[in-house]
Image (cartoon, rainbow, N blue to C red):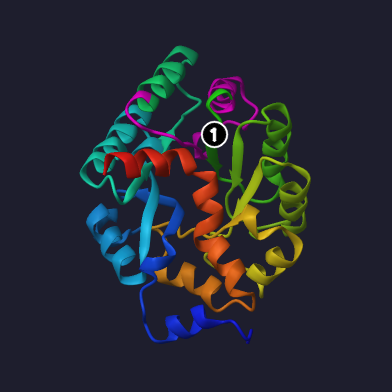
Amino acid sequence: MFEDDSILERAKAFEPFHDLEIIDPHCHVGPWYNFHVQRRGSIESMIEAMDRVGVRYACITAFRAIGPDMQQGNDEVADLAKRYPDRVLPYCTISPNYSDKDIQKELERTYASGFRAIKFHDFHGRTYDSSPYHIAYEFANHYRLPILVHTWGTSNGSVLALMCEKYPQANMLFAHAGSANREAYAQWANDLPNAYIDLVFSAQPYRNVEYFVAKVPAEKILFGSDMPFLSLAQQIGKVLYARISDDAKRKLLSGSARQLFSQAIELAEATS
């Protein structure tokens, strides 16, 4: 155990970490079509979990937007951000199966209503270099926005790495680091100034957190929960119990995300 590991001792005492201003950069909301999600993925159940642990903000995309309806899903998230402006940071989820005109319109519409982050998922069935995605890359590059992207090793992460080079002002958050080819995730985060990784993964390699903290600057690593799919407490727990310094834990739980989502947080704090 590290000599300065007071964060772990607080966790063992079941103390919530409200003072750390923890930010969960990888959350969803609503039910999913092919397996059970507790309490139908309600925002109320998620906020209860956040309060128990001490999480300030959840960055949220709607399952509906990943699935059948980009616009209605984004509307659901916009409503949550209005109802809980001090807890919800909204993602504009983009589906490449809409027209270029509709994608551009959706980006502009959600940005005007306070969205300051974008979400991609390959559930939509298109590679991340497909032409519709470039509209969102260009938008993020212009406004210097983060994009959370579902990845699973080099199968789609390599394409996203190329997009990092093409759009250097758009900060790309590679989801699920350690899911496969974790050496590639470390290389992307180190070689690309605008590449970040999150540690969301239900079953991960032994000492996965320690591996990435040893290989990658902690400022480029974010924890994430994937609520309501996964347990917030479990996903935070793997950071709290990792054999890393308190300073690294603070960065993974709060500092890195606060930097990456600074526009969204500043807007939320100004309006809540």
Magenta stretch contains residue 138: yes
Residue drawn at x 72%, y 47% is 154
Determine whether, in the image, residue 213 is placed left or right of residue 251. Answer: right
Q: Which quadrant holds residue 101?
A: top left
Find numbered disc 1 in the image and state the secondary structure of the residue it sits on: loop
Q: Is residue 169 above or below residue 51?
A: above
**Considering depth in this image, is 71 or 8 the residue closer to the camera?**
8
- Which of the image's four quarters has the C terminus? top left
Determine whether, in the image, residue 220 is placed left or right of residue 144. Answer: right
Residue 70 visible: yes
Residue 201 visible: no
Indicate the position of residue 231 as horizontal and vertical percent values. 40, 67
Q: Is residue 110 above or below residue 100?
A: below
Q: Which quadrant holds residue 93?
A: top left
**Considering depth in this image, is 26 or 64 the residue closer to the camera?**
26
Determine whether, in the image, residue 226 is placed left or right of residue 193. Answer: left
Indicate the position of residue 135 as horizontal and vertical percent values. 55, 20
Residue drawn at x 46%, y 38% is 263
**Considering depth in this image, is 210 or 123 the residue closer to the camera?**
210
Indicate the position of residue 114 as horizontal and vertical percent values. 35, 32
Give the total number of marks visible in the rendering: 1
The residue carrying pointer 1 sits among few (fewer than 14), some (14 to 19) or many (20 or more) residues within 10 Å by Cα, namely few
Residue drawn at x 51%, y 62% is 253
Which residue is disc 1 drawn over?
125
Q: Which residues are magenta?
A: 112-141
Indicate the position of residue 224 as horizontal and vertical percent values. 49, 58
Q: Is residue 154 above or below residue 254?
A: above
Determine whether, in the image, residue 250 is placed left or right of residue 82. Answer: right
Label 1 is placed on what type of residue?
A: Gly
Residue drawn at x 76%, y 52% is 184
Q: Which quadrant holds residue 242?
A: bottom right
- Which of the image's four quarters has the N terminus? bottom right
